Image (cartoon, grey):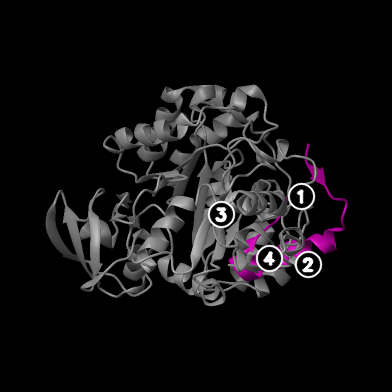
Amino acid sequence: MSEFNPVSQSKIVEEQVLPAANRGNILALTSTCNVRCLFCSHHQNPPGVETYRLNPLGAEQVSRALALMDPEKPVVIGESVTRVMEGEPFTHPAFREILMLIRRTLPRTTIQITTNGSLLTAEAAGFLAALGRVVIYLSLNSADPQRRRQLMQDRHAAVAAAAPALLQKYGIVCHGSVVAMPHVLGWADLADTLRRLDRYGASTIRVFLPGYTRLAPRELRFPSSLWIELHRFVDRLRSQVRTPLTVEPPLISDLQAVVTGVMAGTPAAEAGIKAGDVICAVECLPVAGRVDAFKRILAAAGPVVDLEREGKPVTVKLHKKAGDTSGLVMDYDIDLEDFSRRIRYAVATGREDRPALLLTSELGHPAVRLALARLFPGGAGGVRVLPVKNRFFGGSIKAAGLLVVEDMAAAVRTCLDNDRCARPALVVVPEIAFDFRGRDLTGRSYLDLREECGLAVRLA
């Protein structure tokens, strides 16, 4: 169902790999994958989606990408690049040579590898430990080899199931992730998998709600109530494990800076901060939300933090250097400072009688509304918010990064046809839905909205 464009390797590198390296320190190495996950999005894409298969990169291409990266930020391997199918890094035939090239080029930079764990043998773990400054993001999904084979068609399921213990043995920092499939594997399997990661010292564990498109087979679909059920399930499990658990996407209903968890042995843990604490102020200045609190504590040296714990005020001091991790784990709500800066452009262009129309995803709509209310207490400040339903992908897909021009145009036309309010001065669309050339996942430009709706269009 996916369309893999027959473009040259050099074009994929120039248009996808190098921009990702420059903008996000992401090093896409290969599209080869040694498992076939039931939940894999690439098997559910509607016709018209532009996706590319990347052959394993060579040393020269890797060197070009490394030259564009920020050495102060981790090199990220195994994460998705918009149109490039992400593969399993350990399948690359020269993966060790590439890791050594990275280490020679960036000797003090952390290397962050996302892997399904099926090739994490003792020999591989020993090599990573010797390399140093390696962090593994382990997509375990199921700790039971039989169920993992059912879920992922993994021929090395037992190797992956043993990976958490192996990483702990070799002293390699591990963050776990699980795509929650209780409607396929049951809730007990999810609990056992999370406990396995916790038992062997995962620093954090991310639990993902799977997405499915309108083309997904019936057995992969689930009721919308699963989102709430998953959050409640994880809330109950948090009291039984030490590792901070987060659920993605989070349920954001306020901008309170609630602490989701605290990593063991970190400044936040040593200061006594606990899950459920609400951060009220950092260095005596009130915080604007979770992202604001997290960033300000990260940036500060020895910050004094005012908390609310079970209705009572608590003040603590974190002993850390500026820029060092605090150990706090928090849900992502909205970066209010960045949002404010970007939205001013739209507000300056719109008028009270003709406001700017801000398009959001269904998922991001609640946080955007909360942010606007915080920024403009007396009103919307010349901005109207319009959530856009994802009809192109359909199913359970609600994220802004998967919206396409077709979805946005349909939402704007419906608004113009049915709304008795003033015609907007312009439409502001989410930049994350477009690549560096302003094209969506079907190859259409955001400027096509101007032609279809007769309105000025801006990215934000």
> Which disc number belongs to residue 14?
2
**Dot in front, 1 or 2:** 1
Q: Is 222 on the left-hand or right-hand side of 263?
A: right
Image location (x, y in percent) of residue 387: 54, 50
| Label 1 vs 4, first from the N-terminus | 1
CA–CA distance in space, label 1 to label 4: 30 Å
In terms of secondary structure, where does tag 3 sit?
A: loop
Image location (x, y in percent) of residue 50: 78, 50
Amino acid type assigned to the residue bearing label 4 in the image: Leu
Amino acid type assigned to the residue bearing label 3 in the image: Arg
CA–CA distance in space, label 4 to label 3: 17 Å
Image location (x, y in percent) of residue 119: 61, 41
Amino acid type assigned to the residue bearing label 1 in the image: Thr
Label 1: few (<14), some or many (≥20) within 10 Å?
Answer: some
Q: Which residue is mark 4?
A: 455
CA–CA distance in space, label 2 to label 3: 47 Å
| Label 1 vs 3, first from the N-terminus | 1
| Label 4 vs 3, first from the N-terminus | 3
CA–CA distance in space, label 1 to label 3: 40 Å
Q: Is 244 on the left-hand or right-hand side of 268?
A: right
Q: Which residue is mark 3?
A: 420
Q: Which stretch appears magenta? A: 1-30
**2 drawn magenta:** yes
Between 445 and 249, the one nearer to me in the picture:
445
Residue at the (70%, 32%) spot, across then down: 215
